[in-house]
Amino acid sequence: MQVWAIANQKGGVGKTTTAVSLAGELSKQGKSVLLIDLDPHGSMSSYFKLDPDTHEPSIYHLFQSPAYSVNDIIVDTGIDNVKLLPSSTAVATLDRQLGTQAGKGLVIKNSLAPFSEKFDYCLIDCAPLLGILMVNALAAANQLLVPVQTEFLAIKGLERMLHTLNMILKARAEPLEYLIIPTMFDRRTRAAIQSLRQLRDTYGQTIWENVIPVDTQFREASRKGKPISHVAASSRGAKAYLQLLIRLVDGNTEPSLMASGH
């Protein structure tokens, strides 16, 4: 099972859209996908019409009790081959509750281990916070995707995030491949064009060569609780995520965030 973590400290950059859209494309290719919502805001859970304020059991219970397993929490999304581990607003309290308890950084990785043959892919929608949830996602992942909105403030936060991630990843035994994904690109605006140029100049080979464009069909897909590929397969947004999936599956996302911090 390939495990991809979708992360950025800044909210509203397209993390949930990226996870759901890639899952939709994978499902159309007959791949089985497990989605994990590790965000206290529960955007992915809400996408599939679950209320993170009230839904139980949730990913929160995996951290609270060894009596719970993935099988107890998993729900159907209504999309063929795609299952979900929903979030809860309660996961926002985990850093305070768990503190530095040993082993709590490996809860997700250990919980997924028995399911490595059941799913082809696992996509983790991360919280925009660097804490126990992010540590869990990075420990479980073998690839990191970093969506970045093509605007100035999002770019300013990217360098800080990559620096902090490097510190977290020092605990890993091996490097973690990552790819920066320019999102919400509006080619009609000078600001977006300039931001994209700045990203490419600064991060070079770490950036996907294409972009995810602004597309109103993303909003329509969200309203229906389905991936864009299942709502408007010929839309610009769906085609962009299909190209991204091809890159991720067939291409090499060098360079890596090294365990040594380089």
Image (tube, rainbow, N blue to C red):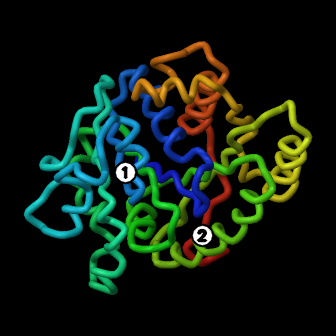
Mark 1 Cα-neighbour bin, 10 Å: few <14, some 14–19, many ≥20: many
Residue farthest to the top? 234
Q: Where is residue 9 in the image (x, y as percent from the top left)?
A: 58, 63
Q: Position of residue 83 (x, y in %)?
A: 28, 36
In the rendered image, the quadrant that contains the C terminus is bottom right
Q: Position of residue 35 (x, y in %)?
A: 36, 43
Q: Which residue corresponds to the image point at 36% horizontal and 77% vertical from the top-left?
A: 95
Residue farthest to the left? 67
- Numbered mark located on residue 82 in the image: none
Residue 75 lies left or right of residue 192; in this view the side is left
- Numbered mark located on residue 258 in the image: 2
Q: Is residue 1 visible?
A: no
Q: Name the residue under label 1.
A: 37
In the displayed structure, would residue 70 be above or below residue 17?
A: below
Q: Which residue corresponds to the image point at 12% horizontal and 49% vertical from the top-left?
A: 72
Frontmost residue, 251 versus 26: 26
Could you say whether the residue bearing mark 2 is in a helix, strand or loop? loop
In the displayed structure, would residue 5 be above or below residue 210?
A: below
Q: Quadrant of residue 153?
A: bottom right
Real-space Cα distance between discs 2 and 1? 26 Å
Q: Nearer the viewer, mark 2 or mark 1?
A: 1
Frontmost residue, 46 versus 211: 46
In the rendered image, the quadrant that contains the N terminus is top left
Residue 225 lies left or right of residue 8; in this view the side is left
Give the residue type at disc 2. Answer: Met
